[in-house]
Image (spheres, rainbow, N blue to C red):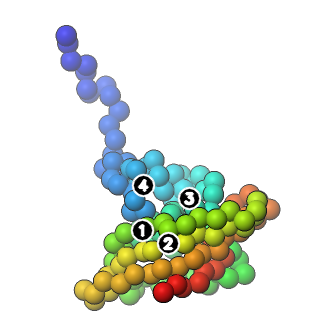
Amino acid sequence: MARPDSSRAPRATTCEREACPCGGPAFADCCGRYLEHGDIAPSALALMRSRYTAYVRRDAPYLLDTWAARTRPASLDFDDAPQWLGLQVKAHAQHDDAHAEVEFVARYKVGGRAHRLHERSRFERGEDGRWRYLDGDLLE
């Protein structure tokens, strides 16, 4: 049996093959479609995972764009940004068509010391159909 001509097969770029920082499949199949291709996150959970990935990648425009206008800061500064190590989603609750919460733990390092950010985040869906981060409560 002859081998297929691999020179004609499309090749995945390194970015497409790398694992997504949120813990999902390849970046291109996970958060990459939201951060790089402009797709709209279909749920608060998908948005939360993509926002974590945006923090890892220091993508301030995406973070600001996916933050509710009434709670969004004017800018984001990544000068002293931690090194993000991993994300664990603990719970996801869809309260109605426009409100949801996601509880998560994000691990990170600052100055060589490991830390955990445990938060219950609130999200709302606007009239444009897009989910946005509203605010959150730190837990533990």
Q: How would you rate the neighbour count of disc 2 (Cα within 10 Å): few for under 14, some for 14-19, many for 20 or more? A: many
Q: Which residue is mark 2?
A: 104
Q: Cα distance, mark 2 to mark 4?
A: 15 Å
| Lower position in the chain sequence, tag 4 or tag 1 | 4
In the rendered image, the residue lying farthest to the top is: 1
Q: Tell me residue 105's x, y (percent).
A: 45, 74
- Give amino acid for label 1: Leu
Q: Which residue is mark 1?
A: 87
- Give amino acid for label 3: Ala
The image quadrant that residue 106 belongs to is bottom left
Q: How would you rate the neighbour count of disc 1 (Cα within 10 Å): few for under 14, some for 14-19, many for 20 or more? A: many
- Give amino acid for label 2: Phe
The image quadrant that residue 112 belongs to is bottom left
| Lower position in the chain sequence, tag 4 or tag 3 | 4
Q: Which residue is mark 4?
A: 24
Q: How would you rate the neighbour count of disc 3 (Cα within 10 Å): few for under 14, some for 14-19, many for 20 or more? A: some
Q: Residue at x 63, y 54 (%)?
A: 42
SS for tag 1?
strand
Q: Cα distance, mark 3 to mark 1?
A: 13 Å
| Lower position in the chain sequence, tag 1 or tag 2 | 1
Q: Cα distance, mark 4 to mark 1?
A: 10 Å
Q: Which residue is mark 3?
A: 46
Q: Residue at x 53, y 79 (%)?
A: 119
Q: Is residue 120 left or right of residue 111?
A: right
Q: Is residue 118 left or right of residue 69?
A: left
Q: Cα distance, mark 1 to mark 2?
A: 7 Å
| Lower position in the chain sequence, tag 2 or tag 3 | 3
| Lower position in the chain sequence, tag 3 or tag 1 | 3
The reply to whether the C-beta atoms of the residues labelled 1 and 2 are less than 8 Å apart is yes
